Structures are given as C-alpha cells and as structure tokens.
Amino acid sequence: MTTQATSVATKWLSGAGLRPTRQRLTLARLLVGDGQHRHVTAESLFAQAQVQEDTVSLATVYNTLRAFCAAGLVQEIIVDGSKSYFDTNTHDHPHFYWEDDNRLSDAPAGELEITRLPKAPDGAKIASVDVVIRLRRSL
C-alpha cells in the first residue's frame, strides 16, 4: 500500500477518534485508502488483507468492522439474517442487492420516492429507513 493510502486511512481513523493500531490501519487502507466507497463483507475484507499479505485474523476483521460501525465510519447493511455488508458511504442511500452474485451496490437515491411511512408505535420513533432492493437477472 502507498504512503498516500496510509495517510488517508490514518486521517479517517483519527477523525473518528480511533487510535490507528496496525490492524485498524491495515483494514482502513483497504477500505478507504484510494478514496473510493466500498461495500464489503468481513470475509471479503479478510481475503483482501490476505492477498496484500497483511496478517489479520477473521475475528479481528469482524471486531474492527464493529468498532468502525460504532465510530460512524461504516454502516452495516443486513441483507438477510446471516449476511451483512459494510458500506463506507454512511449517508442515507438505497442499495441494490444482486442475489445472483451476492453483491451490494448503491442504487440511485434521486430515483427513490418514499411518500409516507407508517406511524411509529407509541413510545417509539423511527430512527432510520433502510432500503435494499433485491435483484435477480432476468432470463
């Protein structure tokens, strides 16, 4: 990884008040080092780290992604009960989930219209609305 990628990763972590440990820096460089947004699973990020010959365990990847979520650096997108993706774009926006490829991508936010939400039950308020549009290739 380049010095620039390390600088970007260090600033990203520092901006959220996270200490740039070796493991956090390794994963942050992979996530934001080139300035592009990503949708990753813990497993895909672990595989990327292995290709880069960076030594981190899968448990460390999971724990680090959870810490990044808690710090507001990434958001978790759950596509079903057992599959989570982590998105470096933390602004509210819809997603396409490509079922054939098990891949998540951004959907055009400007084309989404939600005109009304149901009233929250007494004693609750709506914290957010997550939109995941599932796609299958047509035959």
Image (cartoon, grey):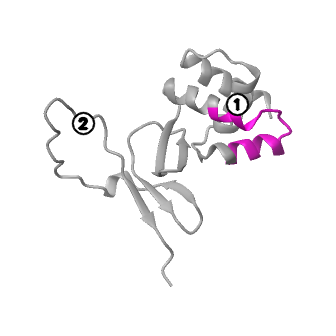
Query: Residue at coordinates 48% horizontally, 50% vertically from top-left?
Result: 81
Q: Which mark is residue 60?
A: 1
Residue lying at 24% horizontally and 36% vertically, measured from the top left: 126
Q: Is residue 34 visible?
A: no
Residue shown at the point (69%, 25%) measured from the top left? 24
At a point 55% along the width and 42% down the height, the residue shown is 86
Q: Is residue 74 magenta?
A: no
Look at the numbered disc 2 and give the secondary structure of its residue. loop
Counting every numbered tag in the picture gives: 2
Pick the residue in front: 24 or 42.
42
Which mark is drawn over residue 117? none
Front residue of 50 and 90: 50
* Helix, strand or loop under label 1: helix
Which residue is label 2 attached to?
Answer: 126
Q: Position of residue 84 (x, y in %)?
A: 53, 46
Type of secondary structure dominating the magenta stretch: helix
Question: Image quadrant for the N terminus?
Answer: top right
Rendering coords of residue 78 (x, y %): 47, 47
Q: Is residue 11 visible?
A: yes
Give, as a single range, the part of the protein colored magenta: 44-62
- The quadrant in which residue 33 appears is top right
Q: Is residue 99 left or right of residue 4?
A: left
Q: Nearer the viewer, residue 53 or 7?
A: 53
How many residues crowd around disc 2 within 10 Å: few (fewer than 14), some, or many (20 or more)?
Answer: few
Residue 29 vs residue 130: left or right? right
Spatial separation of the CA atoms under disc 2 and disc 1: 32 Å
